[in-house]
Image (spheres, helix red, strand yellow):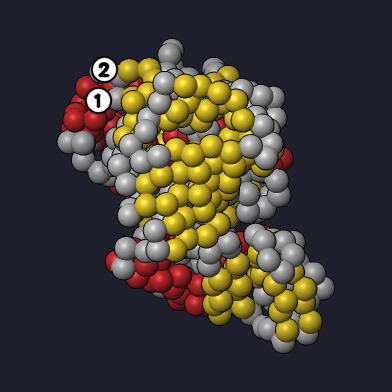
Amino acid sequence: MSICAVIMAGGSGTRLWPLSRAKHPKQFLALRGDHSMLQSTMKRLSGLDVESSVAICNEEHRFFVAEQFREIDQSSSIILEPVGRNTAPAIALAALSVESDPLLLVLAADHVIQDEAAFTEAVNKAIPLAESGKLVTFGIVPTEAHTGYGYIKRGDALDSGFAVDQFVEKPTFELAQGYMDSKEYYWNSGMFLFKASRYLDELKQFRPEIFEVCQASLAGKKADLDFIRIDSEIFESCPSDSVDYAVMEKTEDAIVVPLEAGWSDIGSWSSLWDVSDKDENGNATSGDVMLHNSQNSYIRTDGKLVAAIGLDDLVIVSTKDVVMVAQKDSVQDVKVIAQQLKDNSRSEWNLHREVYRPWGKYDSIDSGQRYQVKRITVKPGAKLSVQMHHHRAEHWIVVSGTAKVTKADETFLLSENESTYIPVGVVHALENPGKVELELIEVQSGSYLGEDDIVRFEDIYGRVSKDV
């Protein structure tokens, strides 16, 4: 029986702020090694007989998913959720969209698995159980009395797994220690393997309203570039529920297969320190870092040199626009800062200074009253939308590559060290016709410089004006 991987790529958590932000969350970041967590999840499937894949993500992150798959030469169906409705509806959309009746291997895009051979072995052990109609979840063999995870209590042995006796909510430390000592409990990983039809049958029995809404919303699906769009009006009426509550806690066919593979959901900076390579003093570093007399700290910089002296059990994260310093045992509270930024309408909670777009990226180098300076990078063959602005003018200076510029009724090429001026209200477009990246400096001036001052007339990526 064939396997279809279902990659859950939604979510915009703030527990790894300031690196992970609402519009660029952790699943799209390279936290360990050269590949993002999403890419690592896809590459992890290479040892399995996976014939197809379906990624589920939201509208805002769709170009991240498509581009990151292309970077590693992987293809996947990408279903766009108009609104988040938790995991039970997301998996239902995947199950309803696949042809024939494959096994669905459901994976989160933001997990770390250090022992991929052990992961492959556990999935292969679970295949016969899933083929027989069981709904398999993978239980992580606990390494500590962790209070941040839900637990699964095993029951009677069945082949390479155990019947699920009970799902348990996040416990107190005393309960978690008892669970660990008993060796009868596993961390709930949120990874599953089951037939598409079995999942839908159980969902239809226990949460028929979810099944019906997902079926109806998918009936009106439309293809859009790399993406599958479902009927948003119908899907918005879908109840929100997790696969655990909707199906796994109710079915009589739930099986847990133990997994001992260096798993982590990277739920905090301290958990990233746990799975990172460390020096002889227990320090994990990334980027240009110099240390002296420091122990057991996590220090990461995406640009400027960070020098750390006399530190112990600290987390320091430096991005282009934020420096965050926290005690390692207090890093869960970074979400409090992120919420304060959101409440104060500051951009740092959801956007980096460097912002990725389907055509490339821009870096907001400097800004002040009535001006803003950006460094813009356009990928070969890519094109920004045909647009105009009501409140700002733009001056473009080409640093490297070739720019094809449309300004009102004229189109012309600009090479290195050449420039042009776009007055307020003039329709314009920018394209890279070359084989190398185009890099230019954009100087904006005007009474309002917000990204929502864009009126689009044409866009090859199908974006609307609010989706810059």
**Mark 2 and mark 1 residues within 8 Å of each other at the beta carbon:** yes
Query: Which residue position holds label 1?
Result: 231
Q: Is residue 39 above or below residue 282?
A: above
Mark 2 neighbour density, 10 Å: few (under 14) some (14–19) many (20 or more): few
- For the point 60% across and 73% down, which residue is it? 315
Q: Position of residue 443 (x, y in %)?
A: 50, 49
Task: Count all numbered tags in the image, as a single digit.
Answer: 2
For residue 280, say whether it is visible.
yes
Query: Which residue position holds label 2?
Result: 219
Q: Nearer the viewer, residue 157 or 126?
A: 126
* Amino acid type shown at disc 1: Asp
- For the point 28% across and 32% down, which residue is it? 203
Q: Nearer the viewer, mark 2 or mark 1?
A: 1
Q: Position of residue 320 (x, y in %)?
A: 58, 61
* Amino acid type shown at disc 2: Ala
Q: Is residue 38 above or below residue 380?
A: below
Q: Is residue 313 above or below residue 69?
A: below
Circle 2 SS class: helix
Circle 1 SS class: loop
- For the point 54% across and 77% down, which residue is it? 326
